[in-house]
Image: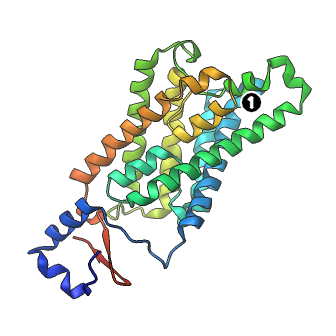
């Protein structure tokens, strides 16, 4: 990396637009040391995803037992996103979902070097939340009447074919997961845009309601994945079929996220494309 001073950087280009384009292609980011550290943000992502899965998957697991119904499941996921975003949003951005992380990265809003740490943290949070349910259920003999603990967790797991709530095969299941992930990432990129006059305060509620309704739409197809971390958390504690079918609930949401991310990167507001470059110990922020 060049050690030139900030004033030596921009003259290499004719316009600020060329600076943005050149740096964006290089994807050179530097951590903003004035904000939370990567470790703090990883803990926030794990904690936020734990809350989301605790509320969303919890509602899905016990809806049949308690007779809550489909709307309660959707509300659980929606409220889980809202609460997690309100608690952890200012620390990590509250992605809570590998598809969102990939989408905002491809959309030019997030450094590529932090993608893997965020995703790992999200998966850990999801596994921890589902593991808690598996432990709690295993201590209650009443649930033995519903089958093994893995069978019970399987009722909230994501699947296709015979494991789809209405027997949709992998292709329609994958298509619906691609669409809902693309819509979610589009909403995230829209409500967090610098041009959004509603501001960051409205983002948790807009995103949360979006997640709730998208999950509700997808439940008949796949039991409502949308989130690869959530799908992984339940698959780990379910029967073997859930792990065998897990590939679809990573591939499809990531495809949907990539579609929206790349479209926003190409056609979205240039004001949202902020690239930073390390120049000795100075961070130069270049925006159009």
Which element type, helix, strand or loop, lies under badge 1?
A: helix
Q: Which residue is at 66% across, 48% downward?
A: 50
Could one spot residue 67 in this view of the protein? no
Q: What x and y, as percent, mark residue 108? A: 32, 58
Quarter residue 131 falls in: top right
- Residue for point 76% across, 42% down: 132
128 left or right of 274 in image: right
Q: Residue at x 33, y 48 (%)?
A: 261
Compared across the picture, whether 10 is left or right of 214 comes to left
Q: Height in image: 78 above or below 12?
A: above
Q: Residue at x 38, y 42 (%)?
A: 257
Residue most toward the right?
141
Circle 1 residue: 62
**Residue 86 location, quadrant:** bottom right
Task: Name the residue at the left extreme.
Answer: 14
Looking at the picture, the colour scheme in use is rainbow
| x then y, percent, for residue 285 | 31, 76
Q: Is residue 223 above or below residue 114?
A: above
* Residue 190 horizontal/vertical position (percent): 36, 53
């Amino acid at each position: 990396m060049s050690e030139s001073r900030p004033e030596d950087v921009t003259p290499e280009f004719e316009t600020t637009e060329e600076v943005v384009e050149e740096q964006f292609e290089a994807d050179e980011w530097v951590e903003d040391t004035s904000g939370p550290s990567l470790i703090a943000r990883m803990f926030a992502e794990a904690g936020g995803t734990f809350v989301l899965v605790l509320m969303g998957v919890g509602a899905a697991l016990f809806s049949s037992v308690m007779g809550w119904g489909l709307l309660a499941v959707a509300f659980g996921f929606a409220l889980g996103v809202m609460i997690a975003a309100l608690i952890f949003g200012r620390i990590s951005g509250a992605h809570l979902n590998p598809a969102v992380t990939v989408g905002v990265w491809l959309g030019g809003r997030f450094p590529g070097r932090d993608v893997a740490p965020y995703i790992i943290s999200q998966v850990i949070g999801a596994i921890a939340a589902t593991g808690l349910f598996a432990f709690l259920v295993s201590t209650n003999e009443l649930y033995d009447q519903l089958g093994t603990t893995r069978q019970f967790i399987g009722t909230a797991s994501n699947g296709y074919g015979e494991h789809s709530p209405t027997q949709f095969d992998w292709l329609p299941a994958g298509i619906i997961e691609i669409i809902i992930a693309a819509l979610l990432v589009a909403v995230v990129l829209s409500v967090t845009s610098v041009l959004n006059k509603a501001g960051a305060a409205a983002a948790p509620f807009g995103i949360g309601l979006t997640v709730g309704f998208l999950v509700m739409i997808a439940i008949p197809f796949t039991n409502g994945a949308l989130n690869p971390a959530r799908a992984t958390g339940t698959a780990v504690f379910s029967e073997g079929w859930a792990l065998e079918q897990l590939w679809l609930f990573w591939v499809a949401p990531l495809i949907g996220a990539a579609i929206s991310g790349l479209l926003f990167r190409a056609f979205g507001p240039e004001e949202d494309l902020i690239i930073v470059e390390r120049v000795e110990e100075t961070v130069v922020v270049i925006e159009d």
